[in-house]
Image (cartoon, rainbow, N blue to C red):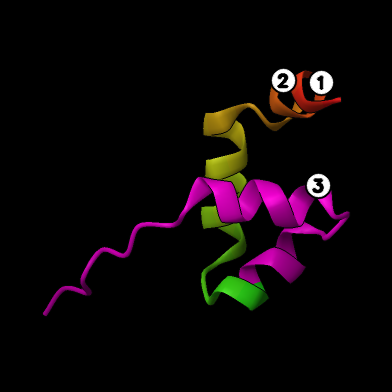
Amino acid sequence: MTMPFRKLDPLKVLKLKSQGLSNSQIAQRLGVTQGAVYHVLRKTDFRKAEIATA
């Protein structure tokens, strides 16, 4: 049996990352793996988002 896919909200990840949380802390809070958080941050290009909001 396969596990259902659960989408991870990139906005929640970015908000927590901008608050200074590590990937593992974000993953723990959202109930996902560190890899999922890493994937969202790479896909959304966190650095560009951080510069745009500054």
Name the quadrant of the N terminus.
bottom left
Neighbor class of circle 3 (other Cα within 10 Å; few <14, some 14-19, many 20+) is: some
Q: Secondary structure at mark 3?
A: helix
Residue labelled with disc 2: 48
Along the horizontal axis of the image, is 4 left or right of 30?
left
| Circles 3, 1 touching at the beta carbon (< 8 Å) | no
Give the residue type at disc 1.
Answer: Ile
Q: Is residue 6 magenta?
A: yes
Q: Secondary structure at mark 2?
A: helix
Residue 8 coordinates in the image, percent (x, y): 44, 57
Residue at 52% across / 46% down in the picture?
A: 10
State how far apart marks 3 and 1 are (Cα).
11 Å
State how far apart marks 2 and 3 are (Cα).
12 Å
Q: Secondary structure at mark 1?
A: helix
Residue 50 coordinates in the image, percent (x, y): 78, 29
State how far apart marks 2 and 1 are (Cα).
5 Å
Residue at 62% across / 53% down in the picture?
A: 13
| Circles 2, 1 touching at the beta carbon (< 8 Å) | yes
Give the residue type at disc 2.
Answer: Lys
Residue labelled with disc 3: 18
Along the horizontal axis of the image, is 1 left or right of 45?
left
Residue at 75% across / 19% down in the picture?
A: 52
Give the residue type at disc 3.
Answer: Ser
Q: Which mark is residue 51?
A: 1
Along the horizontal axis of the image, is 5 left or right of 12?
left
Neighbor class of circle 2 (other Cα within 10 Å; few <14, some 14-19, many 20+) is: few
| Circles 2, 3 touching at the beta carbon (< 8 Å) | no
